[in-house]
Image (tube, rainbow, N blue to C red):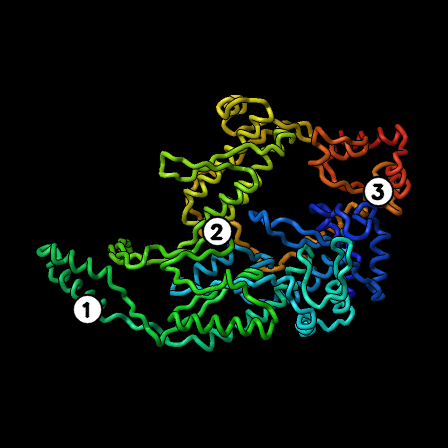
Amino acid sequence: MIKRIFNIKNLISSYELIKSKPGNMTRGTTYETLDGISLLTFKKLQGRLKAGTFRFPPARRTQIPKPGKSNETRPLTIASPRDKIVQKAIQLVVEPLFEEKFLDCSHGFRPNKGARTAMTYIDSKFQSSRFIIEADFSKAFDSIQHKKLMEILKEKITCSKTLSLINSGLKAGYVEFGKLHENLSVGTPQGSILSPLLCNIYLHKLDLYMEEVKLKYNCGEKRRKNKEYESLSNAARYMRVKGRNTSEPAKYRALVKKLVSTPSMKYDHDYVRIHYVRYADDFIIGVEGSYQTAKLILYEVENWINDELKLKLNPEKTGIVKYSEKPVKFLGYTLKASQPKGAQKPLERLKTAGRTITRRRKFRIRIHMDYPKILSKLLTKGFIKSRTNHEKHDQREYRGTFRGNLVNLDHADILRYYNSVTRGLYNYYDFAGNVRHLAHVCWLLEESCCLTLARKFKLKTMAATYRKFGKGLGCDVTLKNGKRKKVILWSPSDFKKQSIQSGNNPTAEPLKGLDAVWNAKFTKSNLHKACIICGKTDGVEMHHIRSIGDLKKPSSKLDFFSRQMAAINRKQIPLCKDHHTRLHSNAWSESEKSQLKQKGT
């Protein structure tokens, strides 16, 4: 396995996958970034991995605020960008090995899996659950036991060098406030490329245990029918056959009214079904059974987690909910009953095989966008502001507001920024039952975008901004080929509820075509290109910059080279060692600068 990890194609593919991501020009505890990387760098790295002498250095840890919680922080571990190449190389080899054994109930940080597939799973499996066990680990990533994790890895990985490499990453430790913490025995660093995969491998044991719980508690072939409902149903059918539904309409309506308020199935202690879904370190359990059964399952699961995984559940976020009485929040969604407890189930008419059937409408779990949570996030990030409307019983109202930190961006970049936010929210929630709230969120973002443009162009009102730029707040941009293109603010064509099965659900088989993608990335790598100035192919290194967006800011004090990189719209440019060294010394000739300038035209 270590041969596949240190394969030069795998290392370069790993570099290609991470090179443009934010943070890869941020140093860890070493001074190395991706700047200056070359084929020679990969050959040296390959040699160290092959010999088994590569060891991960300590990472740098910093505390960042928790979103929406100004008084709380969470640790973020920042590894050296070059160490991330090795982390990614390990992930690309190890992940397919474990993917084939992961269960369908696991959805977080997996290829072709995500929040939408988790909701699809809930929509299909949890419909008859009476109780939901909400569970959340207390600092799961920080509490994973290294010894236990390595034992689990050894079940599938027999290569000692690969195991040693992964273990060195776990033991490397971190530097915080100038103090070195090393030789750790617990925790996978948040921010590491490998952490989500290692967490899934660790918690796969919980997934397997929950299969045992299902086998233990699931019982009964089918639920018993309610005799009272059958009696009322037979009486209604008899009246229809005899035509008494028209001759005695009042009596028939009273009978139907009683029928629709009577459950068709009687609660059956001898019929139990357990369902379970996990997204990373968040999971819920659906119990189609009694409260006592749910209570017993929670007790057993919590004890098993403590004893076997040495993890703890967060008592504030763990409990049993009767979802027909109280909504359940999971992954930014709200799961709630379609009707309050005791409500009559309305009738629906279905046309089938040339006849019309009248039946009770089925009640299902409704999946809604967590509207208050989204508003809170938009408020925290400065997209909206709130006020109290005293004329409407002190009701809170929300309006879009300008984002001052975006004003210095280009018009087109402001639109692209808002488009990414709006599209992201829409694609995440387009199947939610409360699409009218989604429409309101999209409008608040449009309002914020309009006010940001108004502030940028010193326009006094939204109306003036719409008059100047039109309905889509658009602007024209010039492409590299000289053609003009209009960039506008994106909004959905309508807000009809989409099918949960549609949207971004994957259509290809898991991992199918992945090798082809890697090979394509390998052949296109800039590492195999010539120096952009002199054309040399030996000893080519990559010059990196932080962000094209940063370079385009009017306030940026750019050197000549950075301005040209912004013009060419590239974050990495191949240079021979001589030109790369002289670039950092600002020693290029006018002729060399002229050659670079021509690349941007």
Report the quarter where the C terminus lies: top right
Examine the image and state in which quarter residue 569 appears: top right
The answer to whether one can see residue 318 in this image is yes
Q: Where residue 222 appears, x then y in whole percent? A: 35, 73
Residue 285 drawn above or below residue 335: below
Report the quarter where the N terminus lies: bottom right
| Residue drawn 75% across the image and 65% down it | 171
Q: Nearer the viewer, residue 311 or 261?
A: 311
Which circle's residue, 3 or 2, is located before the other in the chain?
A: 2
Q: Nearer the viewer, residue 547 or 535?
A: 547
Residue 221 drawn above or below residue 41: below
User: Under tag 2, what secondary structure?
Assistant: loop
For mark 1, what is the residue?
231
| Residue drawn 44% across the image and 39% down it | 440
Mark 1 residue crowding within 10 angstroms, few (<14) / some (14–19) / many (20+):
few
Residue type at mark 1 is: Ser
Find residue 597 and name its label.
none
For mark 2, what is the residue?
502
Examine the image and state in which quarter residue 480 appears: top right
User: Under tag 3, what secondary structure?
Assistant: loop
For mark 3, what is the residue?
530
Q: Where residue 256 appears, x then y in whole percent? A: 19, 59
Q: Where residue 482 appears, x then y in whole percent? A: 68, 27
* Measured Cα–Cα span from mark 1 to mark 3: 84 Å
